[in-house]
Each structure stands twice: as C-alpha cells, then as structure tokens.
Amino acid sequence: MGTRLISPLFAEGVGMALAALRGNLLRAVLTALIIAIGIMALVGMLTSTTAMESAITGQFSTMGATTFTLQSGGMNIRVGGGRRVEEKAQPQIPLYQALAFQQRFAYPGATVSVSDVLSGTATVSLGSLKTNPNVQVVGVDNGYLMTTGLTINEGRPFSATERNEGKSVAWLGFDVATKLFPQGGALGQSIRVQGRPFLVVGVLAPKGNSAFMAQDQAVLVPVRAGHRLFGTPSSSYAVQVMAPSPEELDQCLQASMAQFRALRGLRPGEENNFNVRRSDAISAILIEQLSSVSVAAAVIGAITLLGASISLMNIMLVSVTERTREIGTRKALGATRSAIALQFLLEAILVSLLGGLVGTVLGILVGNGLSSAMGGVFILPWNWIGLAFGVCLVVGVAAGFYPARKAAALDPIEALRYE
C-alpha cells in the first residue's frame, strides 16, 4: 500500500520539478554550472593523478618484477610536495668495470646487461630527412632487451662480432623508424646519428613513451660502439640484473652487491659507493608523492563544492519566495506537505546531478589532458565517477532540504495572499 502511494507521488514530483526547471531554464543552467565547476575540479585532478599512477606503474613494471639496477647515485625525486628522496653523488661506474661484473657474475639463471644513455638530444637523419633533436642514443647489449621488456619487431640481435668490436650497427625505436621510414624497409639501410653512419639491423616493437622512459624515441647501439663514438671520460654505466624468479630476487640482489663491492674495492663494513634501484621501489616512491596531490585535489574540490552547495541553497530559497503563490495554489487544490517538499527537493537534486554530469565529463577530459601532457595514459576513473555522482546527490539533498521544508510549511491562505 505504501509503495503504491510513494511511486505516483515520486513520479508527480519529478514531473513538477522538471516543469519548474524548464520554466526557469537559465537559472537552472547557471546553478548547474556552479556544481559542474566544483565536480570538474574534483574529478579532473583525481583523474590526472590516477592516470599518472597507472602510467608510472606500467612503465616501471616493463622492467620486470625481478629486475634491479646497479648504478652511481644522484637520484632526486620530488613530486607534488612531500618528502624529498635524495642520494649523494657517487663515483662513476666506468665501462670496463660494468663489463667485468657482467663477465664474472655467475648467479644461475640471472641475466645481466650493461647500458648507458649517451645522449638525449641526438638528431638521426636519412638523406635530407631528419628527426627532431630529442632522440636518445643508448649503448646496450642483447641482454638489455630482456631486462627492460623490449622486443625486436623486425631484424636481429647484435652479433658477437658487432658487440665485441663495437661495430656501427643500430636498433631503431618505433617512433624513429616511423619518422625515417614511413613505408617500412629500414633493415639494411644506412642512417646517420649525430652525423655518424650506422647500419640498421633491427626495429623495436612500440613500447610507449612517458616522462620517465622514451624507448620509442631512441636509437640503441652496441655498448662498445656507443662508448667509442659518444662516450666521455665521465660516462657512467648502469648494470641491470634480472633474477631467475621473484623468489630468488633478494638472494640474487645480495650476490650481485657482494660481487660489485669486490670490483669497487670496498672493504667489509665500508659503505656502498653505488646504488641498487628496484623498479617497483622507484614507482612506489613516485606514487606515494602523487598521493599528496590527490589529497590536495580532494580538498580543493570539497571547498569548491561547499561553495556550490551554499549557492544552490540560496537559489532554492529565492525560488521558494518567488513561487509562494504557486505553492499556495497547489496546497488549495489538495497538494500535501510531502508533495510540495518532494518537488523542491527533487529540483535541487536534479540541478545538482545535471551539474555533476557536465562536471564529470569536463573533469575526465581535463584530467586526461593533463595526464597526457605529462606522459600519462587515458583512463575512465569509474570510482571517481561514482564518487562524483554520490557527492552531487548529497549536495542536492543538503542544499534542497531546508528550502523544501520551508515551502512545505507555508500556510496556503497566507501564500495565496502573497504579492
């Protein structure tokens, strides 16, 4: 019985609320825009930080859960405030030392690679066709493919002769290959990297670029060739080690540190003069720093929505005053207090949800735009979308409750005499 009465009352309330909003369309739109701005700020910032977290996790996970890197210090990470992660400068790792570790490290099943980013501002050319001067030149070996999760789309690995004698051969990142060879056919072609000739022996599969990695915008050359042509006396090489399994990661890491300490001439008890970095640890640091941005975004959005809810309540109160005679007429015709209260409450909720819909769409576009500009990925944050509409519902109820009660409490005789 109660359900049968509530449903028609609710349907009538929705119809009356929609009719009232159409009658004051401009005011309804402007009010919804107030809500939309608050929701856009909330969803936009939370979407961008969520997208960045996803990008960070994805980029660093490509190195594998069992991969770690031995390299000299100098890391300085700070994202969105919070604590700064710093490591003091440490002696370089020369090429001969990195190669010596690779030759001597004998942990069963482990893969070791040696690499260095020799230039981040190189130009690659094919005749008169040139790339932008933002191509990375990286000295690598064949093991680099496994430790970084890269694959050769077409072509072959470097031969033993090419690696040992430092031949001028290269793998092209996907973007570089597409720029110079839009129709394909890169294999066997001679290109110039910073004016020096290289023979293309492979093209890498697309991996995606970000603010942290740029595999597609790179030229990979044998590490000895890279050192000979682009290296400097201060070049410091990184050693990537992939353990045979997650269960053996810690044991492999300890063995590698012991081996590297011996190569660096460190005595027992002496502090390491190199760093060990795990990809999951770096991503965890960055995501932790981004969490402070999320909190700040939530606070900004909450403040904006508080102002929007106060504005919505004021507008609904004005609406009650302007429609006093309408309320009196409806009561004289038999409308109950509940019907009057429900109509005004539904008006506030509908305006709030309309603003939430617009704000959510704009927030997703703005958030993903910011994320894309910083190398993130496009996402649809269903959790934030649900939160946005939940918040809009609460704002609508909170802003409409008092005006609805005031409208329902009006005396019909006094309301009909109101001018």
Image (tube, rainbow, N blue to C red):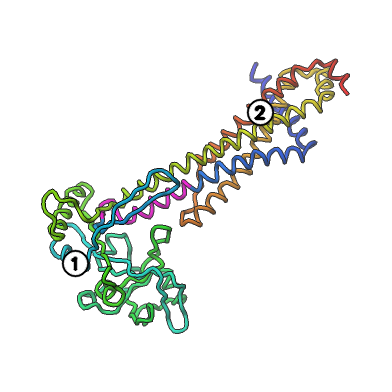
What residue is rendered at 31% in x and 52% in y?
279
Number of disc labels:
2
Residue 99 circle label: 1
What residue is rendered at 26% in x and 56% in y?
69
State which region is magenta: 49-68
Mark sitting earlier along the chain (2/1): 1
Amino acid type, residue under disc 1 in the picture: Leu
Q: Nearer the viewer, mark 2 or mark 1?
A: 1
**In 3D space, how far apart are the residues under numbered discs 2 and 1 (Cα atoms)?**
69 Å
Residue 399 circle label: 2
The vertical placement of 110 against 225, above or below, is above
What residue is rendered at 77% in x and 29% in y?
319
Q: How crowded is mark 2: few (under 14 residues within 10 Å), some or many (20 or more)?
A: many
Residue 354 circle label: none
Q: Is residue 298 left or right of residue 399?
A: left
Q: What element carries label 1?
A: helix
Is the stretch drawn in magenta largely helix, strand or loop?
A: helix
The C terminus lies in quadrant: top right
Residue 184 appears at what percent x and percent y? 43, 76
Residue 413 appears at what percent x and percent y? 85, 15
Residue 171 appears at what percent x and percent y? 33, 72
Residue 225 appears at what percent x and percent y? 27, 76
Amino acid type, residue under disc 2 in the picture: Ala
The N terminus lies in quadrant: top right
